[in-house]
Image (cartoon, rainbow, N blue to C red):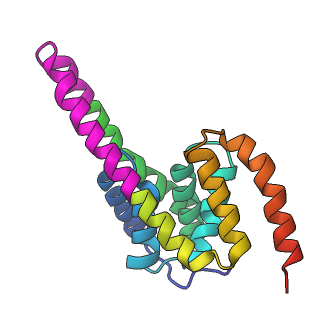
Amino acid sequence: MTAPTVRPSLAALFLSFAGIGLMSVGGGLTAWTRREVVQKRGWLDDRQFLSGYALSQLVPGATNVNLAVFIGTQMRGTLGAIACFCGLTALPLVIVLLVGLAYLRGPAGAGGAWLGTALAGMGASAIGLNLGTGVRLARGSIRGVVPVLIAATTALSIGLLGFTLAHVLLVMLPISLLAAWLTRP
């Protein structure tokens, strides 16, 4: 991966990821992260972002936390990773604690109704954000009939047929690698 051309301050990293964490309570972290890091700030390009996202999915832990650590490391090393991690997790932690407190202190039965409605709305918006990000990234990254078929088969296998990610990867990864090898320039 090429070195980033922009070297943001630790404060800029923290504040950017604090905004991502605040805006994405309920999901959609990848979409917000890409918007902030690639489109708005230009810290990474789409290729670098996708490489980091792929790596973040391979290592143990929450993918989006891993992605924040990856971006922070790319931008400013260990201190950048810490700044991004703290920025991403601090505000959502406070919000979850406050919502939990409100739920526990609220009138019996009333807490669950508003909280369930709020979480359903956040979940729907997270699905939309992730779908939009996936379509935008696919347009720029997936070219040719075979990659489109592989992506569609993977999405349908998991989304509609209900196969687990591990099973789909066991089948589709060798097929993807073989297709890439056969069509290399």
Which residue sits at x=30%, y=45%? 122
Is residue 25 visible to us here? no
Residue placed most toward the observer, 10 or 87? 87
**Range drawn in magenta:** 99-128
**Vertical placement of residue 40 versus 66, above or below:** below
Quadrant assignment for the N terminus: bottom right
The verdict on residue 61 being magenta is no
Q: Is residue 133 left or right of residue 163?
A: left
**In the figure, 139 relative to 54: above or below?**
below
Q: Quadrant of the C terminus?
A: bottom right
Q: Taking 27 as reference, is 117 left or right? A: left
Residue 79 at x, y percent in the picture: 53, 60
The spot of residue 147 in percent (x, y) is 70, 70
> In the orientation shown, which residue stands out farthest toward the left?
107
Number of residue marks: 0
Residue 99 in the image: state x and y as whole percent. 24, 31
Quadrant housing residue 29? bottom left
In this orientation, which residue lies closer to the viewer: 36 or 147?
147
Q: Quadrant of residue 144?
A: bottom right
Q: In this orientation, does residue 31 appear?
A: yes
For the point 55% across and 57% down, the residue is 67
Q: Quadrant of residue 106?
A: top left
- 58 vs 92, nearest the viewer: 58
Which residue is at 46% across, 81% downward? 42
Q: Is residue 111 left or right of residue 170?
A: left
Residue 117 falls left or right of residue 153: left
Query: Which secondary structure class fits the magenta region best?
Result: helix
Residue 150, position as x, y percentages in the image:
70, 62
Is 118 magenta? The answer is yes
User: In this view, which residue lies farthest toward the top?
Assistant: 108
